[in-house]
Each structure stands twice: as structure tokens, then as C-alpha cells.
Image (cartoon, helix red, strand yellow):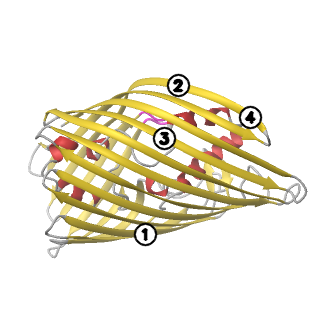
Amino acid sequence: MKNSIALASAFLAASSASTAEIVINDWLSFEGFVDMSYVHYEGDVDATLDGTDAELTESGNSYQVDQVEISWLFDFDPVTAQIDLQYEDLPGDSTAVEQAFATYHFDNGGAITAGRYASMLGFEAFEPTGLYQYSTAYGLPATAGELTGLIPGPIDTFLGPLTATAFPIGARYSQGVKYTYDGDDTFFGISIQDGINLYSDRLGGDPNGFDNGGYGVEVAGSYYMDNGLSFFLGGAYEDGDGIAVGGTPVTGDTESIILNSYVTFETGAWLFAFELFYGENELEDIVIAPGSSAETESFGGLLMANFAYSDKASVTGRLSYTDFDIEGSTTVPTPINGSADAEMLKLTLAHSYAFTDNLLLVTEVSYSDIDADGSASDGIDTLSADADFDELLGAVELIFSF
């Protein structure tokens, strides 16, 4: 649904890469893209742990092919299907089936889809071909990612699920069944799936039996107006029987809820967007601290403006914000209660230039600032900590689409 808003823009070619199906025959075609980038970042971390100050500076460069994707499109009216095969520069397996689903279309605009498909939540597209800049609005800066390697193994393993609770809109693909209705000015969808946040990206559970899997429900609706305004409102709920990462238990039972809403307005060569999200999570039996549990709460959003000053080029400005709180406790070896709060502000300026319908150059400069503090107490002593992350990032991205 989110891509239908982007595709409605008359100036899409100047703000995101264009794809055109390569037709094989009456029932088979394919499309895809190659995404490559150069990134340089410089970050500073100032931290204080129980009165002791520490400072760390990190910088890095990368040049790589970030993602290659080919989508196979099948049309056996009234049934369609899609299989997305991709390579992505990530730890572990780098090739995967990103999406694989079949859809039965009714004459009234309704459709039933089964398989692995994208979430309906979130304004920003999940693919670089649908973004108005290089980076996404939500997620840890590169400097924070480098620091996770300095953390002991069990805690580092837990950071993935914890980050997902801070940025719940980042969950992309799940497996299940959904019903959608797409009218002239309305959209509605409801999905029953394996998860929405902590459980997305796989079906079933851990083969060792620790994780029995989870389920999620996602509902979304939108309304488009003739004056260029569009409104979106969606939400999701998830319940799971524990999380295992690479066969290693991370948490016991989990429960999550996400609320998401955004408004877009198109007028002439301008596109404006305003988004808000809210997320809650409960995690039991966290293995890094036996007998422990945690509750997280996150709130955030973005403001974005895109201006296409020609039929080939556009400029984008974006402000995004996330506030994340966590409260936890453990009973082993002694009762300890703790809490932490983090605020992230990100400023982004990007420029896009389409050399052709198939070749897009995106440049970006972004600044991220994270202020975090926390404390833990056993009823006698209290340990406090705070940290400040600052990062400046520059990126050049080239997208070839076909």
C-alpha cells in the first residue's frame, strides 16, 4: 500500500528509481535492481559510568554492492504470483527469498494473498528504489553498530531483538495470509501472520524446541482525497513463545503492539509526509540475566519534504525522532531493578538525479544524535550511566533498475 502512494507521484522518476517489467510471455515477466553505495561516517561517543568518563571516536568507509534483487511476476488471471530473489550485504546468509506469494483477485477490488509478503505499516518503502534518500528514518547509526562488537556475546545477541523493539516499523516481511481491498480512493487490509516485529522473517520456531514460534495480526487502512491529501492508519499485535537467535535462547514469552499513522500531501512538484508510530513490548526470562523480564516502549515519527525541481532531479529534507524506554528486573542472584531511556534525532538532506529511466544517483548527508541514560539498583547501591552518540554520515548511492 505504501508504494501506491509513491507511485501516484507525477515526479516519481526524479525521486526514486524507475522499474519496467521485462516481458517473457503472456504470463511471465521480471524486474529488478542493483544497489551499490559508498559511505563514510565519523562518530563520537561520550559516556559516563558511575562517575567515570570515557570517550571513543569511530570512523569508517565502505564501498559495496548493498543489494541485488530480481522479481519474477506471474499472471494467470485472476491469480497472480511474485517471487523476489535477493542478495544483500548482511552477516550470515547473503542470499534469500525475500518475498514469495500468490494472490487471488476478486472482481470487486478485493484480493486474498498467501505466502511471504511485506508489512503494510510504515511510510518509507522497504527497497532503495522506493526511497527518497539513501538511509531510512529509523535505526541505529553506524557508530552504535560498531560498538556492539565490543559487548560480550550474550548481551550482543540480545541487542538485535532489543533494537527491533526500539524501531518497530523496521520489521519488513512476514509469512501468512491477508485480505486486501483496493478501491478508487480507499484501501483496507488485514493479515494473519507469523509475527509483526520480533517474529517476522521466519515461520515456525527454533529447531531445538526453545522457541515455538509466534503469531501476529496486522490491520491497515487509508483514504485518498482529490486535493492530494492521503491518510493512513494501521496497527499490529504479536504474541510469541520465546525468541532464539542462531539456536541460542534470548528471551521467553514476548508480546508486542504497534500503532502507525501517516499523512501525505502532494501539490505540484512538492510531496510532504508526516508520520507517527508507537510500540510496546514485554519480554520474559531474558537469558543474559536469569529470572529477568523487561518492558519497552517507543515513540517516534518523521517529517519529510521532497521537491522535484526538474524532470530528472529532486531534493529531500527529512527530520526523524525516536524515544525509547526500557524497564527491567531480575531476581538472580539478587533482586535488581533498572531502567534506561534513549532519544534519537536524525537530520537528513538528500539529492537524487536520474541519468536515465534506469540509472539513479542519490547523494546524502545525515546527522544523528542519541542521548541515553540509565540506572540500576539492588535496593542498597545504585549504578548510573549515560552516553551521547554523535555521527555525521555521507553517502553516494547508484541504483540500476530494470
Q: Earlier in the sequence, mark 4 or mark 1?
A: 4
Closer-to-camera residue (23/171): 171
Q: Which residue is the site of mark 2? A: 59
Q: Which region of the structure is painted magenta?
A: 89-94
Q: Which residue is the site of mark 3? A: 368
Q: Earlier in the sequence, mark 4 or mark 3?
A: 4
Residue plotted at (20% across, 46% down): 307
Quick check: 74 left or right of 375?
A: left
Q: Which residue is the site of mark 1? A: 235
Q: Residue furthest left?
A: 26
User: What amino acid type is highlighted by mark number 3?
Assistant: Ser
Closer-to-camera residue (339/95): 339
Residue plotted at (35% across, 49% down): 126
Q: Determine the secondary structure under disc 4.
A: strand
Please give the label number shown on residue 53.
4
Quick check: 66 left or right of 9?
A: right
Work out whether residue 313 can be spotted.
yes
